[in-house]
């Protein structure tokens, strides 16, 4: 039955993405910031609906003013799930810009691309982050530096926490939990050598997909000043891991059942 969903959902997804590209290229230049933010949020909700992904939130996200959202990273879906709550300028590896359609779209929506392996790449992105914070924008960071199966949290790189501390911006950790028909799953993790089309196949041929976002307590400017960059990264990691990690045996079982 799931295979019948693919020829229905894929054309809808392509049309929705093309509509987003049209909006970003031809409409966004004439819209005030508040209207662009509203459009990004509504479009992201629509994209997740096309993919059959429902979204559930726990906790209270910082809704206004500059903030650094820090999250575990499981899939390309993460960006749009978080944008459905509040539009966020994400820091992403430069490879994403080369993706057909989606890459052009995230670039047009204000993503900051990190050119790995290039000297001064982190410093360059840091300067761009400072400018966005000064404009009152939210920035999203995946400090693991790569995607995971979503059942644990890899160590955090602390470099890109520095701009938030320098300009005095709150940091809010966010735990992303992928579920399939009520159970935690690794089915939709975008890991290893998997292609975007392969990942889309898993996503578009099933029902009962949900991503739960847990907005953890904010790490305030005052607390950040006491902890320092490495301390803030460790604190954020701890808060996220509390929600993401599954006890060893359950984690093992989930991986065996769900990994395709």
Image (cartoon, rainbow, N blue to C red):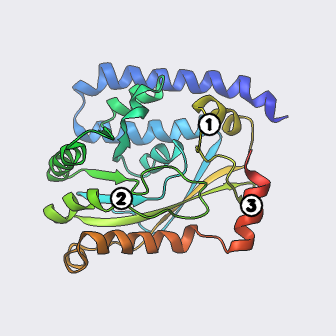
Closer-to-camera residue (120/164): 120
Residue in the image at 27% along x and 61% along y: 161
Number of marks in the rendered image: 3
Find residue 115 and report its image quarter: top left
Mark 1 element type: loop
The correct choice, above or below, for 11 with respect to 127 in the image is above
Mark 2 vs 1, N-terminal side: 2
**Horizontal placement of 248 versus 156: left or right?**
right
Residue in the image at 63% along x and 21% along y: 11
Task: Classify 10 Å Cα crowding around label 1: few (below 14), some (14-19), many (20 and above).
Answer: few
**Horizontal placement of 16 versus 98: left or right?**
right
Mark 2 element type: strand
Label 3 to label 2, Cα distance in Å? 27 Å
- Residue that label 1 marks: 194
The correct choice, above or below, for 231 with respect to 192 in the image is below
Label 3 to label 1, Cα distance in Å? 19 Å
Residue in the image at 74% along x and 70% along y: 250
Do the numbered discs 3 and 2 sit on residues whose CB atoms are within 8 Å?
no
- Residue that label 3 marks: 254
Task: Classify 10 Å Cα crowding around label 2: few (below 14), some (14-19), many (20 and above).
Answer: many
């Amino acid at each position: 039955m799931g295979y019948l969903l693919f020829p229905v959902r894929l054309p809808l997804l392509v049309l929705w993405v093309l509509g987003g590209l049209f909006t970003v290229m031809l409409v966004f230049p004439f819209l005030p910031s508040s209207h662009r933010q509203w459009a990004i949020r509504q479009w992201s909700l629509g994209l997740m609906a096309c993919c059959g992904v429902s979204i559930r939130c726990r906790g209270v996200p910082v809704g206004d003013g500059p903030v650094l959202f820090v999250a575990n990273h499981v899939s390309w879906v993460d960006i749009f799930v978080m944008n459905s709550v509040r539009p966020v300028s994400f820091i992403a590896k430069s490879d994403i810009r080369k993706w057909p359609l989606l890459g052009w779209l995230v670039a047009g929506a204000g993503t900051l691309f990190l050119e790995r392996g290039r000297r001064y790449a982190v410093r360059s992105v840091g300067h761009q982050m400072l400018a966005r914070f000064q404009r009152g924008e939210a920035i999203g960071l995946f400090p693991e530096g790569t995607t995971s199966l979503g059942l644990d949290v890899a160590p955090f790189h602390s470099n890109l926490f520095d701009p938030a501390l320098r300009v005095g911006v709150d940091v809010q950790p966010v735990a992303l939990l992928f579920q399939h028909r009520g159970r935690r799953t690794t089915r939709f993790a975008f890991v290893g050598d998997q292609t975007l089309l392969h990942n889309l196949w898993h996503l578009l041929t099933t029902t009962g997909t949900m991503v739960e976002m847990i907005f953890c307590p904010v790490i305030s400017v005052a607390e950040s000043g006491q902890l320092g960059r490495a301390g803030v990264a460790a604190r954020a990691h701890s808060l996220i891991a509390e929600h993401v990690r599954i006890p060893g045996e359950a984690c093992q079982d989930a991986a065996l059942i769900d990994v395709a």
